[in-house]
Image (spheres, grey):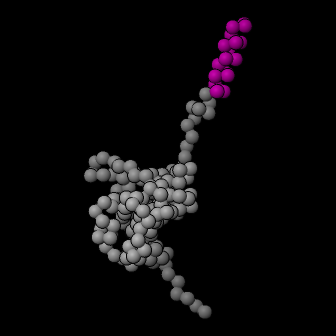
Amino acid sequence: MFALQQSPAELSLSNYSHRRIWAAPELSSHSLLVLTSRELHLTPLTGDPKPETLAAIDAGGDLDTLLGPLATMITLSTIRRVRLDLLANALVIESVRNGSGTGRLTIAFTTPGAADGCFTKIWRRLGERYRPALAERDLWPLIRAPLALLAMVLLFTALTV
């Protein structure tokens, strides 16, 4: 049987139109995280969200009305850096606030899989201009001990000559 195949552009547009939701208890720092195609919404930690609220959000309801005035909203275009910390099961998001300053927001999860899943979804929504940065170790702590040993050997050699 033949099936109509969508182009990659159509697939990506259909994936981005759907809202992604993470809720407590999977989310440990906030009650609810909603990722849309252009924004990230977070509600303060007040307990598990109601099933009716989750259903209304998934159905496409107005997030400002459903989440309330205490919700935090970050536009994805203002995000400058997202760091995934798998040891702490957290995401650290740095974004531009009020045009000039930068703000930092930490989102904690209960499992590394949930943190990794959220990071992947945010990274895909940010688009092509964001590239992963490899974690680089600081060189000085690695070479300090061998250099100190070499300096002591040279000093000992100079003193004995």
Query: In percent of the image, x 53 and y 50: which residue is there?
Result: 88
Nearest the viewer among 46 and 91 is: 46
| Residue 31 at x, y percent in the picture | 42, 62
Q: Can residue 75 be seen?
A: no
Nearest the viewer among 47 and 27 is: 47
Q: Tell me if 87 is positioned left or right of 75 in this view.
A: right
Magenta span main SS: helix
- 116 drawn magenta: no
Nearest the viewer among 116 and 156 is: 116
Q: Which image quarter: residue 34? A: bottom left
Q: Can residue 105 be seen?
A: yes
| Residue 104 at x, y percent in the picture | 38, 49
Q: Tell me if 114 is positioned left or right of 79 in this view.
A: right
154 over 10 or under it: above or below: above
Can you say which quadrant of the picture contains the N terminus?
A: bottom right
Q: Which image quarter: residue 122? A: bottom left
- 156 drawn magenta: yes
Query: In percent of the image, x 53 and y 58: which residue is there?
Result: 110
| Residue 111 at x, y percent in the picture | 56, 59
> In the image as oriented, which residue stretches furthest toward the bottom?
1
| Residue 11 at x, y percent in the picture | 48, 76
Residue range in magenta is: 145-161
How many marks the image carries: the answer is 0
Can you say which quadrant of the picture contains the C terminus?
A: top right
Nearest the viewer among 49 and 21 is: 49
Q: Tell me if 161 is positioned left or right of 118 in this view.
A: right
Query: In percent of the image, x 27 and y 52: which residue is there?
Result: 98
